[in-house]
Image (spheres, helix red, strand yellow):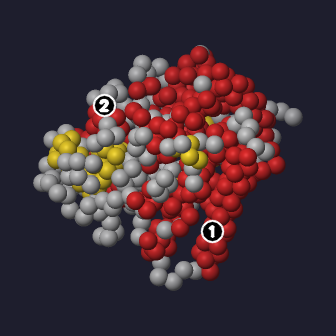
Amino acid sequence: MQLLSETMVAATGPAPAHRKVYPEIDPRVLGDPRCFTGGHPFATYARLRQQAPVAWQTELDDREPGFWAITRYEDVARVNSDPVTFSSQKGGILLSAGPPETRHPLLFRASMDTMINMDAPWHLQLRKEHMPFFTPRYLNTLRERVAQESTRLLNGVEAHGGECDLVETVSSRLPLFTLCEILGVPEADRPKFLNWMHYLELAQSLAADRSKIAEPTIELMQFIQAFNENVSEMFEYGLHMLKKRRDDPQEDMMTAIARAKVDGGYLPDEYLDGSWLLIVFAGNDTTRNTISGAMKLLTEHPDQKAKLIADPSLLPNATDEFIRMVSPVIYMRRTASTDVDLNGQRIGEGEKVVMFYGAANRDPAVFEDPDRLDVTRANASKHLAFGLGPHVCLGKRVAQLQLEEVYRQILQRFPDMEYSGGIDIAPGNFVHAIRKLPVRFTAKAA
């Protein structure tokens, strides 16, 4: 089995092969991770949808090829749904791997050698191995455990006496609990995952800092050392456990990953590393950041919060609306496998095509009054936050059930809980990562 990290084709040069139909974007708008510390640039998305829905952006680093930014719902849906024309495997799903000197060797390789970067037939062969853990029967059992853990976490919130950081107490913990349940991680090992996720979420900003600092400070060097140690520990643990499951299978997803076969053979270690990174990262971030983002949305739209408190049966639809508005994954990339026309723009073979989900999910052509939270929105489930087509997120129902269960309990136990200001969003243009979300609420009398 070929390694994608060694066979992926580099994107074409800094200029597009064909004439640009729409205005070009300022390279700082979507390419600089630091521009996302205030959240999605929704005003910029709106301008692009109207004036330049297929817009060329030159990368900030002139060593990197530029890319086409796709912002309209119809175009994002088309690119997602056509893996033959818009390949994942030719260049991967990340906008850029960054300059070689800033790449973490293990993280870079693992982020390339993974199912999400594959086209058919490999992608389908691996995907089917994961399916048993997303059936209605399995999810019903999982829901019970998620509800119990939500209760336990909210008991801890209650002990904080009226204010806390929702990320620290709930948002960062519930998705990791759920992930560990699905994987089959032993109880004693689960605290390690919180620490690993902390460092994984800082990977993009760390690379950006290192590329811009001529002489690293002692503090930065110490952080880099801790970062490298934790990343190595995460992969060592994953490879050890996956090989253990290969020899001693259990009824868990770790076994499914370990014993998955492509073209009749088990995955080599490089793909085990990639599978481990994908499940640890993807199994956490979407839910974590939507739990946090939903609290901010409900605070900003108190009328919608009142509707949910009055009628909890609206929660399943509301979770889709939360996900639509938060759009926790900012973008996914594809590479054109041939020359193709998209919304009047000719795209050249080998050029990067980048879908911005937050832009598509607020397209007024699909969602009426798209910047308003509406927990009764009839087409909330049409959002593209989980992708579309053959690469649609396998874990979307897991994310939805976690949101439903935790907000069912939050709204019942803490109906006046609200965001109190001071949100902290990590620099990064791949994931909308909320690191801190202070909340206040009425604490029950002792």
Q: Taking 281 as reference, is 411 above or below it?
A: above
Front-most of residues 46 and 415: 46
Q: Residue at x 52, y 40 (%)?
A: 126
Residue 401: % across, % down: 61, 28
Horizontal arrangement in the rendering, residue 18 relative to residue 203 (left or right): left
Count of residue discs = 2
Front-most of residues 441 and 83: 83
Q: Residue at x 63, y 54 (%)?
A: 197
Q: Residue at x 66, y 25 (%)?
A: 138
Front-most of residues 169 and 276: 276
Callout in the foreground (2, 1) = 1
Query: Would you say residue 44 is visible in this rendering?
Result: no
Q: Taking 348 as reference, is 76 above or below it?
A: above
Residue 77: % across, % down: 33, 34
Dot 2: what SS? loop
Cα gap from disc 2 to disc 1, whole angstroms: 44 Å
Residue 224 placement: quadrant: bottom right
Dot 1: what SS? helix
Crowd tier of the residue under label 2, counting other residues whose Cα lies within 10 Å: few below 14, some 14–19, many 20 or above: some
**Residue holding disc 1:** 228
Q: Which mark is residue 364?
A: 2
Given the image, on which type of amino acid does mark 2 rest? Pro
Q: Residue at x 63, y 62 (%)?
A: 231
Query: Would you say residue 253 is visible in this rendering?
Result: yes
